[in-house]
């Protein structure tokens, strides 16, 4: 993913925001803020005929060095192509490349209502760790978030 993809990435992220079950965000940030909040490695877009169909990126979970191999996944697929394998393809490349970068744990926080995202993560080797109850308030309603994680088998965790 590069800044050249930003308008398409922004469009897809906005579709997720509008749907209401993808993020606590209420509006898409501008590129500098988004770029700053995501790691420089492991940013990918799925392209078909130069059209962005989906994207995936990682964010750090802490500045503490002991968490250097732990990252949070953001993955969004254009609603027009959901269910066509785009998310699985993005997740596969993300996992492979994140392991090459030395990440040992990928995590995701997903609203329970977002069943397609939960299924995608579980299919990709994530497991449910727990439910973070009433983690944040959105539209005057408390929202729970399911915490999922995937441990790398290649980075040497026994």
Image (spheres, rainbow, N blue to C red):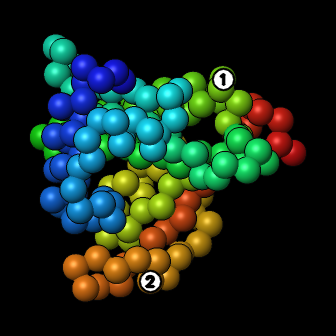
SS at circle 1: helix
Quarter of the image containing the N terminus? top left
- Would residue 154 be found to the left or right of residue 139 on screen? right
Measured in 3D between alpha carbons, the distance from the residue under mark 1 to the one under mark 2, in whole angstroms, is 35 Å
Given residues 129 and 55, the one toward you in this image is 55
Asked which quadrant contains residue 71, the reply is top right
Decide: few, some or many residues near mark 1? Use Cα within 10 Å; few <14, some 14-19, many ≥20: few
Residue extending farthest top: 49
- Identify the residue shown where x is 45% and y is 71%: 145
- Identify the residue shown where x is 17% and y is 22%: 51
SS at circle 2: strand
Residue 127, horizontal then vertical, whole percent: 59, 58
Asked which quadrant contains residue 56, the reply is top left
Q: Is residue 20 visible?
A: yes
- Would residue 47 be found to the left or right of residue 110 on screen? left
Residue 15, horizontal then vertical, whole percent: 16, 50
- Identify the residue shown where x is 74% and y is 37%: 153
- Asked if residue 25 is positioned above or below residue 48 in the image, the reply reads below
Residue 104, horizontal then vertical, whole percent: 71, 40
Quarter of the image containing the C terminus? top right
Circle on res. 134: 2
Residue extending farthest left: 80
């Amino acid at each position: 993913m590069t800044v050249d993809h930003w308008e398409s990435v922004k469009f897809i992220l906005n579709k997720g925001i509008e749907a209401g079950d993808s993020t606590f965000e209420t509006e898409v940030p501008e590129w500098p803020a988004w770029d700053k909040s995501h790691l420089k490695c492991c940013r990918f877009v799925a392209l078909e005929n130069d059209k962005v169909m989906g994207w995936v990126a990682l964010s750090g979970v802490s500045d503490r060095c002991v968490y250097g191999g732990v990252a949070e996944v953001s993955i969004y697929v254009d609603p027009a192509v959901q269910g066509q394998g785009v998310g699985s393809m993005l997740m596969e490349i993300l996992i492979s490349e994140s392991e090459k970068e030395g990440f040992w744990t990928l995590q995701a926080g997903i609203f329970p209502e977002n069943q397609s995202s939960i299924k995608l993560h579980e299919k990709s080797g994530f497991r449910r760790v727990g439910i973070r109850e009433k983690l944040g308030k959105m539209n005057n309603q408390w929202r729970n978030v399911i915490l999922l994680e995937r441990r790398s088998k290649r980075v040497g965790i026994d």
